Amino acid sequence: MGPKIISFINYKGGVAKTTSTYHVGCWLAYRKRQRVLLIDIDPQTNLTFLCAPVRKWEKRRRNIGTIATLYRRYIDQKPLDVKRYVWRQPIRLPDGDRHPRLDLIPCDVNLIGEDLGIGSLTGDFDSMKMLKKSASAFVRDRTFLARVIREVSDDYDYVLIDCPPNLYLMTHNALVASDHYIVTAIPDHLSTIGLSILGRKVDEIGATVEKAATLAGMSPDGCAVAKFGAILFVRVRIGGDMVTNAHADTMDSIRSRLRCFQTHTTELIGYTEAAANSVPVWFHQSDNARRARAKMEYPSVVDEMLEMF
Ligand SMILES: Nc1ncnc2c1ncn2[C@@H]1O[C@H](COP(=O)(O)OP(=O)(O)OP(=O)(O)O)[C@@H](O)[C@H]1O
Ligand SMILES: [Mg+2]
């Protein structure tokens, strides 16, 4: 059996997609002893910088390459040789040891142009042949990440993909490559509206890829999009020790309609402090990080996830 593949998505920015991918991955590897591969497909490269300092990333990008290099190779139909691009155990713990069992395929800003997508199903097709050709290019552009993961699937128990804050080409790739997707959301009113739109959009993407596969004469099985996993509420504001009423009400209302994690993460500065030091919150030594760690939020999310999938 291959690894479980999970994408963290939301087209909204700043909703802890990256923080969640990172902490879930680190806890799975550290305490649950799973072999984890993180994949950064956001040209902002935040997940990569949570794993390694900029200086090391620059060197690696120059000497080896990133997911953007892999994507170029894929487009040019060269052998991918994915293992070469996997950064083995990039996280350094405060004692100098490497974080065990956790690898990364890093990103870089060069993915920006690629991320917008080339293929489109709209437009005039002057013949059936053109239509088929265009449909097969459309599918090919969306199965890059699935190909990448297939090459290393024996090496991991979990593959976690950190998506950019949009639903463009790379997010389509993540959805096609994944078994499930988790939506991170701040439980405020506007985000609630966004959640329904997001679910609909993912279904649309699934239908379009399936249609393209059929037109191209391919089996749509290999390009089905991920199933909805659950919503994870993040950055929930507390007053004293209480969740603020507005957030609590919104979470209750969404939980009555959609599958959500029972655990939420709290808005705590310790997460940001740990991020600045490129370690998960349980490895950072500051009072604020200790406060965040004591809540054991991401470890509980992982426990729920292990039950869920
Ligand atoms: N529970 C939390 N408490 C306080 N700050 C948090 C929490 N979770 C995340 N953050 C901070 O919020 C900011 C945004 O988080 P993050 O980068 O994970 O969001 P994102 O959804 O990946 O953003 P983007 O859409 O830009 O990729 C970061 O500075 C992060 O450290
Ligand atoms: Mg991010």
Image: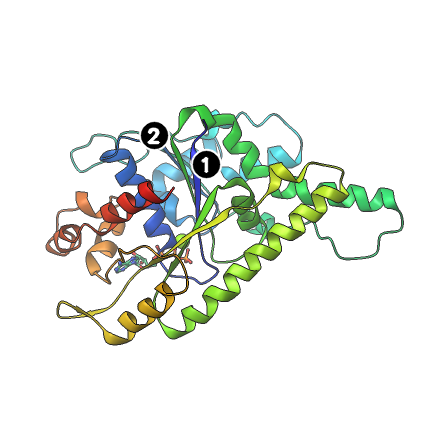
Packing grade of label 2 (10 A; few <14, some 14-19, many >=20) is many
Q: Which amino acid does label 1 sit on?
A: Arg
- Taking 28 as reference, is 125 left or right? right
Q: Along the line of sight, which residue is nearer the eye, 231 or 239?
A: 231
Which quadrant holds the C terminus?
A: top left
Q: Which residue is drawn at 50% across and 38% down?
A: 67
Residue with the mark numbered 1: 61
Looking at the image, tell me whether mark 2 or mark 1 is earlier in sequence order: 2
Q: Which residue is drawn at 64% across and 52% down?
A: 207
Which color scheme did the rendering employ for the protein?
A: rainbow
Q: In which quarter of the image is ligand 1?
A: bottom left
- Taking 132 as reference, is 230 left or right? left
Q: What residue type is labelled 2?
A: Arg
Q: Residue at x 32, y 51 (%)?
A: 19
Q: Where is residue 289 in the image (x, y as percent from the top left)?
A: 16, 52
Which quadrant holds the N terminus?
A: top left
SS of the residue under disc 2: loop
Residue with the mark numbered 2: 35
Q: Along the line of sight, which residue is nearer the eye, 178 or 140?
A: 178
* Residue 186 lies in quadrant: bottom left
Label 1 beta carbon less than 8 Å to ligand 2: no
Q: Position of residue 14 (x, y in %)?
A: 38, 61
Q: Residue at x 17, y 38 (%)?
A: 94
SS of the residue under disc 1: helix
Q: Where is residue 210 in the image (x, y as percent from the top left)?
A: 66, 46
Marks 2 and 1 sit apart, C-alpha to C-alpha, by 24 Å
Q: Is residue 271 above or below residue 61?
A: below
Q: Hey, which residue is sitting farthest front in the picture? A: 256
Label annotation for residue 194: none
